[in-house]
Amino acid sequence: MPESDLNLLIEKTRAAFLGVALGDALGATTEFLMPGEIRQRHKVHRRIIGGGWLNLKPGQVTDDTQMSLCIARAVDQAGGWNLQGVAEQFALWLKSKPVDVGATCRRGISDYIVKGQLVKPYSDWDAGNGAVMRMAPVALLTLGDETLLERLALEQARLTHHNNLSDAACLTIGRMAQQALLGAGRPQLHALTRELCEQFPKFRFNHYHGGASAYVVETLQTVFHYFFTTAEFEECLVGVVNQGGDADTTGAIAGLLAGAYYGPEALPPRWLKKLDPAVKEEITTLAERLVRLSPLGRRLTRSNNSCAGVVRRPAAES
């Protein structure tokens, strides 16, 4: 398999991870607003301008991107998956007094700091979107191994959220992102949402009513509705964040899927120009490292080395 295939995959994974940050930065402006309030203030919100209830600088990101980067850093430092390393990165992040952190995430991380707890007890109150918003690095790291995706998705989720709806959302978004990266079309991606809705009918979105709260059901309904009823990366994210509610998180999750599906050419240059340069640089670097560590990335690398006549000892897969 030619090296160009691996290079193309790396570029698509960068687009997916950058999509998270772009959706986060765009949506932070309209977080907690109602659609009518957004129309009054912006008509249609489509520029990365900062502000919002957190009074952010243009291009600044929130906990969605920051927690995703925590996972990616932990993987990069360990050279593979290390759940305690992820928890340590979350703890360092929380101690840094981030601009925003969800209550459920705060409790889960605090329990790790105080008790060393790596798995939260099951709770009916953990059906928020705080675990699914950080699925990008897990999806990239586990490319080529769905069993590994399932295990790592749930491990990272249950550091802060232990709930059937949250678990199912994490797995579905991870699978959709991976299939989109590998070239799946809309019918294949829609089939994954139908599987989710068959298991948990609450997620049905064919009669979308506009709720966009932090409740993971409403979050995914919003993301799915706009992903499947739009035809461009920008159109998808603009639709999502103009619903208000938990707009930074709906924007981040939609950005993951749309970035994976549409690819790097679809990311609006004016948005990329506004994005925090340090965040953009770190995502660009870590996305490549994650995919090279993935089962698929390692297979492509071994195949390329074999074709080139290079014999190297393969690294152990996570």
Image (cartoon, helix red, strand yellow):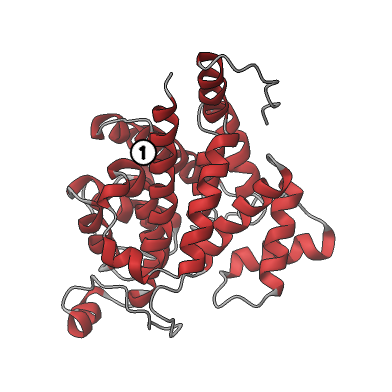
Residue with the most extreme right position: 115
Residue 230 makes an appearance in the image: yes
Please state the horizontal and vertical placement of residue 263, each as a whole percent of the image: 31, 44
Is 178 placed above or below 93 here? above
Q: Is residue 288 left or right of residue 57?
A: right
Towards the viewer: 28 or 103: 28
Q: Which residue bears the numbered disc 1?
A: 197
**Residue 267 is drawn in which quadrant?**
bottom left
Q: Is residue 255 left or right of residue 17?
A: left
Is 168 placed above or below 88 here? above
The residue at 24%/35% (across/down) is 186
Is 28 placed above or below 142 here? below
- Count up the numbered dots: 1
Task: Assign the C terminus to one quadrant of the image.
Answer: top right
Q: Amino acid at mark 1?
A: Cys
The residue at 58%/60% (across/down) is 67
Task: Assign the N terminus to one quadrant of the image.
Answer: top left
